[in-house]
Image: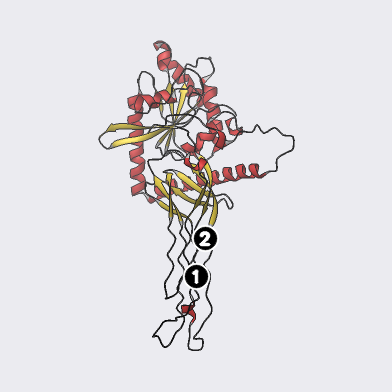
Amino acid sequence: MQFVDEASIIVEAGNGGNGCLSFRREKYVPKGGPDGGDGGHGGSVYLIGDDALNTLIDFKYQRFYKARNGQPGQGRQMSGKAGDDLHVKVPVGTTVIDEDTLEVIADVTEIGQVVQVAQGGRRGLGNIHFKSSTNRAPRRTTPGTEGERRNLRLEMKVMADVGLLGMPNAGKSTLIRSVSAAKPKVANYPFTTLVPNLGVVKLGTHEHFVMADVPGLIEGASEGAGLGLRFLKHLTRTRLLLHVVDVAPFDDSDPVEAAQAISHELEQFSATLAERPRWLVLNKFDLLPEDEREARADEIVSRLDWSGPVFRISAIGGDGTDALVQAAHRWLTEQRRMETEDEEAAEREQDMRRRMEAEAVARAEARLSHKRKPAVEDDDDDDFDDDEYDVDVEYVQ
């Protein structure tokens, strides 16, 4: 299937029905009078979080969503039928942005969460509402109001607890295959991973967490090089980053320089995301002679001036992976406990999420401003278009 994580749609709520101008003219009724009914309210448009969806591909082919109009009122004080609301399912993890105002309307983060994105029009009033002792035959009604219309930008970010970060071919996909049931494509060449992959890491009954693998970064990603920058947004919902470093690269490149380049690109993409706790995972230790492994690890840690946790693993053989996932699970459990019991810890987490959302809005504004610039004549239309980036993948959760 195709993986699409951004889409632009138009939503339009239904118009309210007009009020009715009517007077009673019935046999055997000596006195008439106004009896025009009210119109019906227009239907509203709602988005609903659905865990059965993991891509926005449906919105690529259908971009206009309209709720039903309310019916006009009728005589005999009969009100018009209200328009049916329109409920649109979106993947959990979808951020909804108004493209015209760049307002973040909602963040759909829970299954079944309902968000109103377009308010239906109000009903019009029939002439029965305007009768009085001095105006017994009012000819006044009110029309229904128009439903709200919005241009929306949907941006999906996968919901994961732990995110994998690193250069292409560092072993991120192999690691997620080793510790979860996810089966992303693995091959001995860079950029094998083209889209994010999710894996559920199970440690026991009711003990698990979700790990996300995104395409690898390269130097210059913050300026548009490679694929990783486009998918880095999927790491903004994670709580912990695992920086995977290949200690035995096939091209004899320097692992330290590669790690430093990734750190730089991460900071350029989001200064707030760079503040997330990050652990160093030294991978492919099985490719080094046993007598060189510790010295190589100490050299990398020293040159990086790394003060955080360090794990030595071989993802393909599973060596050291159990200790890594156990430590990650303990850390996540402690973080959730702290946020439940400590208001300051909970506020820090919310503040970090708000800052990352503000950065996302700024990036969206920059993209939209770029798209709105008038095209230069005689310029070849070879620019990359997100909506045209289609990849056949198997997206596993």
**Label 2 amino acid?**
Gly
**Label 1 amino acid?**
Gly
Residue at 45% of width from left, 59% of height from top?
43
Q: Secondary structure at mark 2?
A: loop
- Across and down, in percent, residue 355 comes to 51, 46
* Rendered image quadrant of residue 337: top left
Residue marked by disc 2: 147
**Location of residue 233 with respect to 186 vertically, above or below:** below
- Across and down, in percent, residue 260 comes to 54, 27
Residue 56 appears in the figure: no
**Location of residue 246 with respect to 231 vertically, above or below:** above
Residue at 42% of width from left, 65% of height from top?
81
* Image quarter in which the N terminus is found: top left
Q: Residue furthest right?
A: 377
Q: Earlier in the sequence, mark 2 or mark 1?
A: 1
Asked whether 331 or 304 is in front, the reply is 331
Residue 271 appears in the figure: yes
Residue at 35% of width from left, 22% of height from top?
320
Residue marked by disc 1: 124
- Across and down, in percent, residue 322 comes to 32, 26
